[in-house]
Amino acid sequence: MPKIRCSPPSPYSAKVRMSAKYAGIDFESAITVTDQPSADFLADNPLGKIPVFITDEGESIYDSRAITQYLNRISRNALFPRNAAKRTEAERLEALADGICDALLAHVYERRYRPEEMWQQSWLDLQWGKAMRGLDILNDTPPKLPKKITAGHIALRACLAYASLRFEGKWERGRSKLTRWAKRFDDKFPELTAFLPRSS
Ligand SMILES: N[C@@H](CCC(=O)N[C@@H](CS)C(=O)NCC(=O)O)C(=O)O
């Protein structure tokens, strides 16, 4: 069975595990620590980042967007529309959700890996601005939630759960369309919620 290297709080791990589940692809989760990467892990991904998808043949695939494309191919388009314009829209939604996560993660890492007296406020503000602008755009026009969703919808759900995990109470005000969207997503796809970012 394929293996996904992942960790419970990671939004990109959540996205690929939810995507695999949605696409009907069985996998085993291999919880992986990134702080002190093992030799095995680095053999799978020299960047020492998760998620990594490892096929039955032992091929490792990263990063998360390469994985969602791969999952889409092996599931005959379960995750992206065939129509070119719609596909671009889904890929852009995935990129926006991932980009918000990149900014939030940079904010978390600045505070996690540097002593407090060295935190760079201008850097934190720059990252926060990216994340909040992204969330504003999405709140203005939340994507429709049809029965057949895309990896873009899944990325957005993972992103909102990560924002709530790390920044609860700091992003939701004025963005009630998005918080309602997340609730509707969970009601419609309860089988995916087990993989949403949570503390390890
Ligand atoms: N662009 C990558 C980002 C992956 C990423 O940054 N993952 C984090 C965990 S959420 C990680 O592995 N961090 C460890 C590190 O950067 O050394 C993707 O989409 O997979």
Image (cartoon, grey):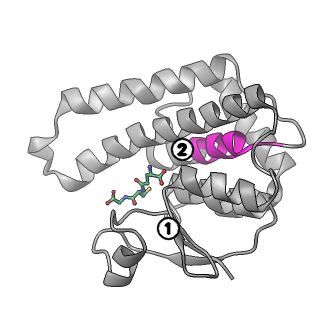
- Which residue is label 1 attached to? 7
Report the magenta residues as a range.
Answer: 149-160
Residue 43 at x, y percent in the picture: 37, 77
The quadrant where ligand 1 appears is bottom left
In terms of secondary structure, where does tag 2 sit?
Answer: helix
- Secondary structure beneath dot 1 equals loop
Closer to the camera in the image, 84 or 125: 84
Residue drawn at the location 38% of the way across and 46% of the way down: 105
The reply to whether residue 174 is in sight is no
Q: Is residue 38 above or below residue 61?
A: below
First in sequence: mark 1 or mark 2? Answer: 1
Q: Residue placed farthest to the right in the image? A: 147
Q: Position of residue 6 (x, y in %)?
A: 51, 68
Which residue shows up at 43% across the image and 74% down it? 44
Is residue 156 covered in magenta? yes
Label 2 near ligand 1 (CB < 8 Å):
no
Q: Amino acid at mark 2?
A: Ser
Closer to us: 36 or 128: 36
Q: Report the magenta stretch's main SS.
A: helix
Q: CA distance from mark 1 to mark 2?
A: 17 Å
Q: How many marks?
A: 2
Magenta stretch: includes residue 1:
no
- The circle on residue 37 is none
